[in-house]
Image (tube, rainbow, N blue to C red):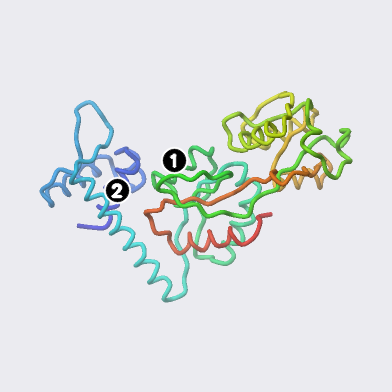
């Protein structure tokens, strides 16, 4: 029996899909089915419940045990590989990372570049997703690390807090507030605003702060990404509240004015998440350490 067989089985359970497990391991769906049957014949136990007409993957009692112990074997094998790499001081391999657009587009390029320069034998495979998909991909094992704003505690996930981002008010350079160095939340009452969509973590946090201060703003538009919000503010739709790293370039270019918000609550926590039951590769550990060192710029 090979380590690859255990990995295929665990991927099948994590992804709940024969086709996705096959794709991840560069084999056919038929090969995945054959591997499962081979395991069942070897251990003389049924590992999966098969229901005609249904494609979901359901473990038997024996399958639950086999999955749990196989995960331990895979973790030990990964640790073995990392220990051998460590003997020669080499950090290599690919770290799969899922990151939200609002964090990744503005804060990750510099960090990834720094990591690659320090560890040229390693590679960061970075993809951008919405918050819900980042969490889902980490839980399923599709990626090793997830990076997102306002990380929420969840069973089975470990969170490593990164330096938080300061939230700021942005407006067109000719707006009446543009020359202010600082503004209080109560001064925003009744003003036109371009907001994130209601289900995004940053929008929820913004709404909470405004509500606690008894402030109501006029919603002019809602968008799901920072870039569209910035463009809308530039052309005069209204004001917006965004993380400072996302608007530095526009401020330098004179396209937007950035005004500090006086209250201490205007911060955006950022964190790295990974599955608690999995041992991070050495490369992933080094990347997490790098992200935790100082605010990305």
Task: Say which residue appears at 72% left-offset and 47% top-offset.
Answer: 264
Give 239 or 269, whichever is nearer the viewer. 269
Quadrant where the image shows the N terminus: bottom left
**In x, y percent, where is residue 170?**
78, 38
Asked if residue 250 is positioned above or below residue 190 in the image, the reply reads: below
Task: Indicate which disc, 2 or 1, sits on the residue closer to the N terminus.
Answer: 2
Q: Callout 2: few (<14), some (14-19), or many (20+) C-alpha neighbours within 10 Å?
A: many
Asked if residue 63 is positioned above or below residue 280 in the image, the reply reads: above
Which type of secondary structure does the marked residue at label 2 adopt?
helix
Which type of secondary structure does the marked residue at label 1 adopt?
helix
**In x, y percent, where is residue 290?**
58, 61
**In x, y percent, where is residue 87?**
41, 76
Task: Say which residue appears at 32% left-offset and 46% top-offset.
Answer: 11
Q: Are marks 2 and 1 in contact (CB under 8 Å)?
A: no
Residue at the bottom extreme of this rendering: 87
Quadrant where the image shows the C terminus: bottom right
Marks 2 and 1 sit apart, C-alpha to C-alpha, by 16 Å
What is the number of the mark on residue 201? none
Mark 2 lies on residue: 10
Q: How many marks?
A: 2
What is the number of the mark on residue 136? 1
Task: Say which residue appears at 29% left-offset and 48% top-offset.
Answer: 10
Give 166 or 78, whichever is nearer the viewer. 166
71 sits left or right of 261 in the view: left
Task: Say which residue appears at 62% left-offset and 42% top-offset.
Answer: 102
244 sits left or right of 101 in the view: right
**In x, y percent, where is residue 295?**
66, 56
Q: Callout 1: few (<14), some (14-19), or many (20+) C-alpha neighbours within 10 Å?
A: some
């Amino acid at each position: 029996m090979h380590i690859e067989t255990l990995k295929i089985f665990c991927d099948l359970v994590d992804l709940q899909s024969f086709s996705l497990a096959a794709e991840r391991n560069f084999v056919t769906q038929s090969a995945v089915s054959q591997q499962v049957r081979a395991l069942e014949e070897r251990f003389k136990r049924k590992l999966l419940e098969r229901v005609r007409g249904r494609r979901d993957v359901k473990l038997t009692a024996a399958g639950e045990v086999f999955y749990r112990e196989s995960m331990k074997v895979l973790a030990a094998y990964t640790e073995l590989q990392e220990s051998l790499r460590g003997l020669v001081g080499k950090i290599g391999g690919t770290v799969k990372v899922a990151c939200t657009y609002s964090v990744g587009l503005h804060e990750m390029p510099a960090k990834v570049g720094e990591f690659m320069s320090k560890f040229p034998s390693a590679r960061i495979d970075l993809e951008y997703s919405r918050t819900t998909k980042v969490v889902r991909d980490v839980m399923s094992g599709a990626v090793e690390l997830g990076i997102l704003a306002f990380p929420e505690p969840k069973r089975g996930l470990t969170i490593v807090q990164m330096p938080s981002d300061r939230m700021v008010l942005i407006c067109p350079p000719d707006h009446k507030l543009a020359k202010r160095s600082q503004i209080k939340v109560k001064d925003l009452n009744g003003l036109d605003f371009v907001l994130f969509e209601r289900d995004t973590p940053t929008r929820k946090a913004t709404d909470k702060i405004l509500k606690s201060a008894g402030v109501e703003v006029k919603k002019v538009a809602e968008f799901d990404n920072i870039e569209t919000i910035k463009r809308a503010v530039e052309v005069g739709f209204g004001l917006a509240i965004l993380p400072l790293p996302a608007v530095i370039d526009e401020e330098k270019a004179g396209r937007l004015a950035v005004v500090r918000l006086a209250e201490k609550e205007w911060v955006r926590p950022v964190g790295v998440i990974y599955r608690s039951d999995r041992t991070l590769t050495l490369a992933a550990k080094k990347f997490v350490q790098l992200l935790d060192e100082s605010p990305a710029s």
